[in-house]
Image (tube, grey):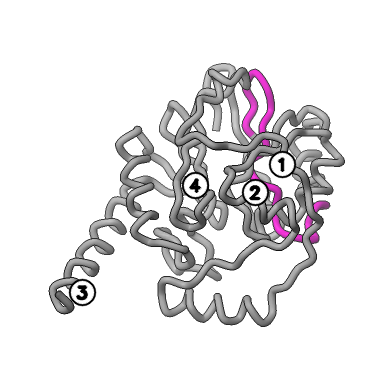
Amino acid sequence: MQHPSFEFHRIPVGINNCFLLRGGTTILIDAGAPGHVKDFMHGMDRLGISLREIDLILLTHGHADHIGCLRQIQHLTGARIAMHEADCHWAESGSPGLPPGVTLWGRLLHGLGRVLYRPYIHPCEVHYVITTARSSLMGLGYGIPGQVIHTPGHSAGSVCILLDSGEVFAGDLAMNAWFLRSTPGLPVLAEDMSLVIQSWKRLIRMGARHVYPAHGTDFPIAVIRREIDIWEAKHMAFQNKNP
């Protein structure tokens, strides 16, 4: 997880992976599941990195398991918060949405979530609203060799962070956790799977080669390529049956 003058680390916070990027500055990707701020603090202690070293909290999207500890982490670190404009209202209201299921298991999870998963989320101000399709973290002065890419599909305001070396921090644009999927691949929950596919094709064209999802362990981009082929074949078959 190291490059010249740059490194990144995974910090599990509840069911969610947060990632710490350290170059010219230090950026935290996502803020973990509700009620797990101690996981974040233990992860930082394990790395030997001061909380106050974090300059920016960059949110991949606004669902509860990604903004659950946002206000506590922001208070601990003093970091500014960045998020795409389409999801800002979820963080600032403390009332995130729940994405629909796109598979049988995903639909079951969505139904259970509507009934059982209602965590309290502290509202939190977003300091930097992302409005562009892509932004260079190096060009913005953060000293991180990568870009923030708007990748809608899982939510309207989903973003991924693509490093120059090909690693992509995908949020929920990909999944690899036992409670979501038995194998790595595309999300089982999404607002628009057609946009998920378009977003992944864009990332692949831009050089994505290894995927770091918010849920589960990392895997090579070849897995996503296969998943796209399978999804497009099924989609084409459905269209042929229903012209």
**First along the sequence among labels 2 and 1:** 2
Mark drawn on residue 170: 4
**Residue behind mark 1:** 126
Q: Amino acid at mark 2?
A: Cys
| 187 in magenta | no
Q: Confirm or deny contact between disc 2 and disc 1 (CB under 8 A).
A: yes
Query: Tag 4, which secondary structure?
Result: strand
Q: Amino acid at mark 3?
A: Phe
Query: How dense is the environment of label 1, judged by Cα within 10 Å: few (below 14), some, or many (20 and up)?
Result: many
On the question of residue 223 being in view, the answer is no
Query: How dense is the environment of label 4, judged by Cα within 10 Å: few (below 14), some, or many (20 and up)?
Result: many
Mark drawn on residue 187: none
Who's the residue at 31% across and 48% down the image? 222
Vertical order, 91 against 134 (above or below): below
Q: CA distance from mark 2 to mark 1?
A: 7 Å
Query: Tag 1, which secondary structure?
Result: loop
